[in-house]
Amino acid sequence: MKSVVQRVSSASVTVDGQIVSTIGKGFLLLVGLTHNDTDESLTWMARKVASLRIFEDSEDKMNLSLADVGGEILAVSQFTLYADIIKGRRPAFISAAPPEQAVKLFDQFCSLLESESVPVKRGIFRAKMEVSLVNDGPVTILIESPPPAVSSK
């Protein structure tokens, strides 16, 4: 699982000319899911994102979390985070979870974020979205969940 966390002053998703989700201060979260993501990787990522301390405190140090600043998340599924461009010039997406699996994983991940007491709004899965944001900082962080434990069999 991969997530791109962008600290924002505001962000929104528009589909077919209609705004479907909008947030103020918080994170625009681009979420890439792969076929071998597990409950453990989703839980790890949700806890990591929810507890990130990347908002400035009174001394201008990144020391505050979403909860500390009353922030929220706009989560957008982004299979292109698993683009493979090693060969050729057109990306391959064989590492991305297939849509039927990805939508379940994405919903589960968003629910896990909400269970961490983070307000979550979402883009529309598989829709052609226009994503707008005001990047605060700018601060952009790429997080990749650790690989699943390898069995000793």
Image: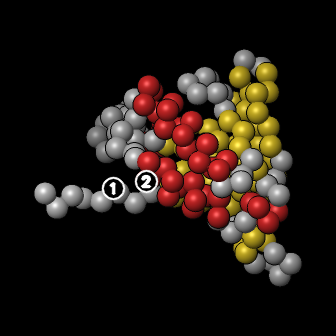
Q: Nearer the viewer, residue 97 or 6?
A: 97
Q: Nearer the viewer, residue 31 or 51?
A: 51
Q: Position of residue 43 (x, y in %)?
A: 51, 53
Q: What amino acid type is highlighted by mark number 2?
A: Glu
Q: Nearer the viewer, mark 2 or mark 1?
A: 2
Tell me if label 2 and label 1 are in contact, CB under 8 Å: yes
Q: Earlier in the sequence, mark 2 or mark 1?
A: 2
Q: Which residue is mark 2?
A: 40
Q: Position of residue 114 (x, y in %)?
A: 67, 47
Q: Which residue is mark 1?
A: 148
Within-10-Å neighbours for mark 1: few <14, some 14–19, many 20+: few
Q: Position of residue 65 (x, y in %)?
A: 73, 65
Taking the spot 36% from the left edge, 39% from the top edge, the residue there is: 35
Taking the spot 69% from the left edge, 30% from the top edge, the residue there is: 130
- Tell me how many marks there are: 2
Taking the spot 82% from the left edge, 62% from the top edge, the residue there is: 69
Direction from residue 26 to residue 111 in the image, left or right? left
Q: Nearer the viewer, residue 128 or 54?
A: 54
Taking the spot 64% from the left edge, 64% from the top edge, the residue there is: 51
Within-10-Å neighbours for mark 2: few <14, some 14–19, many 20+: few
Direction from residue 129 to residue 119 in the image, left or right? right
Task: Give SS at disc 1.
Answer: loop
Residue 103 tag number: none
- Quarter containing the C terminus: bottom left
- Asked if one can make out residue 22 in the rendered structure from this viewpoint, the answer is yes
Task: Give SS at disc 2.
Answer: helix
Q: What amino acid type is highlighted by mark number 1?
A: Pro
